[in-house]
Image: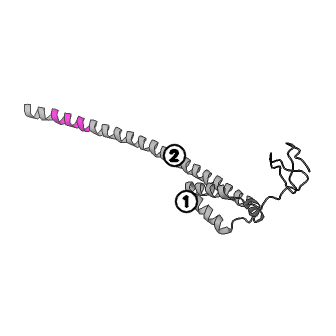
Amino acid sequence: MQHCTNCGAPRDAGANFCGNCGHRFADEPAPEPAATATTAASADDTPYGGEMTVAAVLLSLFMPLIALIVALVMRAGELRPSRRGFLKSWAIASGAWLCTGWIVALLIFSSVASGAGGSVREQHGEAERECAAAGADRHAADRLGRRLTSA
């Protein structure tokens, strides 16, 4: 009778593992791992078709935030390397386009805000000049009216 080399417990005939400590016996070949979804997915490493590329580009252009979320969610569940690479590129492009959109929006907003401030100041200056001119005319008319009534 053979004994376990790890704990010394007696080995049952045909056993691959020790019943006492769970040590795998070296003289028996290790059991082959069952085929998993990872190996099956790796065997079929076909990239996405052209329709997916068109959809990704259109979604990235018109709705970059949604495109970024979709790409990240899809990449989390994808096991095939070529598709994971495509989804990574799609996520990076969507994020870059999203950032570009925000930068352009901030530039437009700041230029409109600074331009509006200048025109308001100009309008205020014109209104002050008109009031000053009207006030001078009113004072002149008042003085003329006093002269006419006193004469």
Q: Is residue 109 magenta?
A: no
Q: Secondary structure at mark 2?
A: helix
x%, y% of residue 26?
89, 50
Horizontal arrangement in the rendering, residue 35 relative to residue 106 (left or right): right
Q: Residue at x 57, y 52 (%)?
A: 98
Q: Earlier in the sequence, mark 1 or mark 2?
A: 1
Q: Residue at x 83, y 49 (%)?
A: 18
The residue labelled by disc 1 is 62
Q: Which residue is mark 2?
A: 106
Label tally: 2
Mark seen at residue 114: none
Dot 2 amino acid type: Leu
Which segment is the magenta one? 133-142
Secondary structure type for disc 1: helix
Query: Colour scheme in the image?
Result: one colour
| Magenta portion: prevailing SS class | helix
Left or right: where does residue 146 sit relative to residue 65?
left
